[in-house]
Amino acid sequence: MNRETAPHGLSPLDRIRCRLAEGPRREGEFNGDGRDLAPPRPPTPAAVLVPLVVREQAPSVLLTRRTDHLHHHPGQISFPGGRLEADDASPVHAALRETEEEIGLARSHVELIGALPDYLTGTGFRVTPVVGLVHPPFDLTLDAFEVAEAFEVPLAHFLDPRNHQEHSILHEGRMRRFHAMPWHGYFIWGATAGILMSLYRLLHEEA
């Protein structure tokens, strides 16, 4: 199935599955919040799981809030994941391992359907967003040191352009742009919002 023939009457999850099945995506204009920064060294490989929960009424996205005492990105909203370790065979392995360690979500509940374009962060990571469908019922066990809470946001919120914001900040003499998608008191921004924008563009890009 190619982009011209992909059906538009499918559910969002089926459309995402079809798009990812077409193969690697081309990188869009925004390939990371670090795209305008001169990296001091080659980026560190990392991976996250983009967990799309298959709920009966409507699909949702599973997110976490990092604890406030962490050195990197304290209190921020994120996907489960982290840097690749020496014994990780692939970004997929790293994303699933980190997900199990951070929130206790067993990989048996995750149906892998593909990956979004790598995302370059301003902190020097090249993140591979691995997309998986999460099938309930499942239980979570949070790593209390790293994760303050886990919560779900309707997928429709992120697919509605009315909820997309773009901000800018002067960082070390350069203007740095970043996306944000606030939801019910949660300020979802930076790499997490940028990856969600990649998911949005996946469904709206032209052939």
Image (spheres, rainbow, N blue to C red):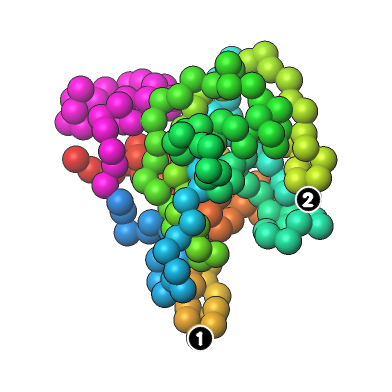
Q: List the residue tagged with mark 2.
A: 67
Q: Name the amino acid type tagged 1.
A: Gly
Element on which disc 1 rests: loop
Element on which disc 2 rests: loop
* Residue 124 among magenta residues: no
Nearer-the-camera pick, 61 or 159? 61
**Quarter of the image that includes the N terminus:** top left
In the image, the segment drawn in magenta is 1-26
Residue 30 placed where, x, y %?
38, 58
Determine which of the numbered discs, if any, sits on residue 51 in the image: none
Q: List the residue tagged with mark 1.
A: 173
Residue 205 placed where, x, y %?
28, 43
Residue 176 placed where, x, y %?
49, 73
Q: Name the amino acid type tagged 2.
A: Thr
Q: Residue at x 39, y 21 (%)?
A: 14
Q: Quadrant of residue 21?
A: top left
Q: Is residue 24 left or right of residue 141?
A: left
First in sequence, mark 2 or 1: give its number.
2
> Whole-Å distance between the Cαs marked 2 and 1?
30 Å
Q: Report whether residue 126 is seen.
A: yes
Q: Is residue 180 left or right of residue 23?
A: right
Q: Quadrant of residue 38?
A: bottom left
Q: Residue at x 66, y 49 (%)?
A: 77
Task: Determine the residue located farthest toward the front in the rendered image.
Answer: 86
Residue 54 placed where, x, y %?
55, 20
Query: Dominant secondary structure of the magenta stretch?
Result: loop
Q: Is residue 204 left or right of residue 174?
A: left
* Residue 25 among magenta residues: yes
Mark 2 Cα-neighbour bin, 10 Å: few <14, some 14–19, many ≥20:
many
Nearer-the-camera pick, 75 or 96? 96
**Quarter of the image that includes the C terminus:** top left
